[in-house]
Amino acid sequence: FSSTGRSSGINAEYGTFLLYTPRTYEYETLAGEVAGDLNLIPRGHNSEGEIEEALRANSTLYSKTLAAIIFHPVELNQQSYSIRMKSWLSMWYTDRLYPLISSPAPRSTDDYDGFPFYYRTGFLALQSSLDSRMASLGSFISVNFPGAEIKEIK
């Protein structure tokens, strides 16, 4: 639950698995903590290509996967990552500050969410949990909070 008393926004219809790579003790621990925060099941893979292959080969895994986290080690004390969500979320334009078509009215009448549904799909909860967990690691990883990179899982 967030400080407003609402749930994290993750609904089982969006997925129950959280995939990650690379499969190392540090990332297994980090992904396990994030998955625990969000009631997801972590599943490690050796590479991004292995994740893509597993999702293509197993339609059940694809339908039950919320997202994949691709960790990109930069240096010993730095870290970056990409979050990959399902292809139906490819309508997100994360490189834009404002919607493609401006409107004098609010984007949505929903108080907490609206198109493109960052909250409802669990993206915001996932990014928040991951950033918080990485920041809490303290001295061995310094976090430069990244912008979101949404990339279609094919």
Image (cartoon, rainbow, N blue to C red):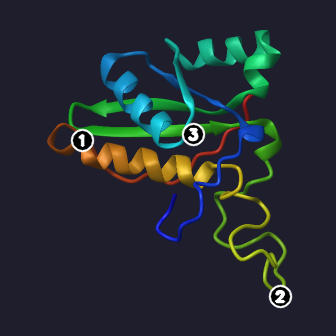
- Label 2, label 3: how many angstroms apart (C-alpha)? 30 Å
Q: Secondary structure at mark 3?
A: strand
Q: Residue furthest front?
A: 5
Q: Position of residue 31 (x, y in %)?
A: 44, 30
Which sits earlier in the primary sequence, circle 2 or circle 1? Answer: 2
The residues tagged by marks 1 and 3 sit, at their Cα atoms, a distance apart of 19 Å
Q: Amino acid at mark 3?
A: Ile
- The amino acid type, in three-letter code, at marker 2 is Ala
Task: Give the mark, 1 or 3, whose residue is nearer the N terminus.
Answer: 3
- Judge from the rendering whether residue 59 lies leftward or rightward of residue 138; answer left or right: right
Q: How many marks?
A: 3
Q: Is residue 69 left or right of residue 9?
A: left
Q: Quadrant of residue 145?
A: bottom left
Up the image or down, 24 lies above or below 112; here it is: above
Mark pair 2, 1: CA separation: 42 Å
Q: Residue at x 32, y 33 (%)?
A: 74
Residue carrying label 2: 105
Check contact, mark 1 vs mark 3: CB within 8 A: no
Q: Are marks 2 and 1 in contact (CB under 8 Å)?
A: no
**Foreground label between 1 and 3:** 1
Residue in view at x 36 percent, y 51 percent: 132
Residue beneath disc 3: 83
Q: Residue 98: percent from the left, percent from the top?
A: 70, 73
- Give residue 66's position: percent from left, percent from top: 67, 35
Q: Residue at x 80, y 52 (%)?
A: 91
Taking the view exactly as shown, the residue that stands out farthest to the left is 139
Q: Disc 1 marks which residue?
A: 137
Tell me which label, 2 or 3, sits earlier in the chain: 3
Decide which of 38, 26 is in the foreground and name it: 38
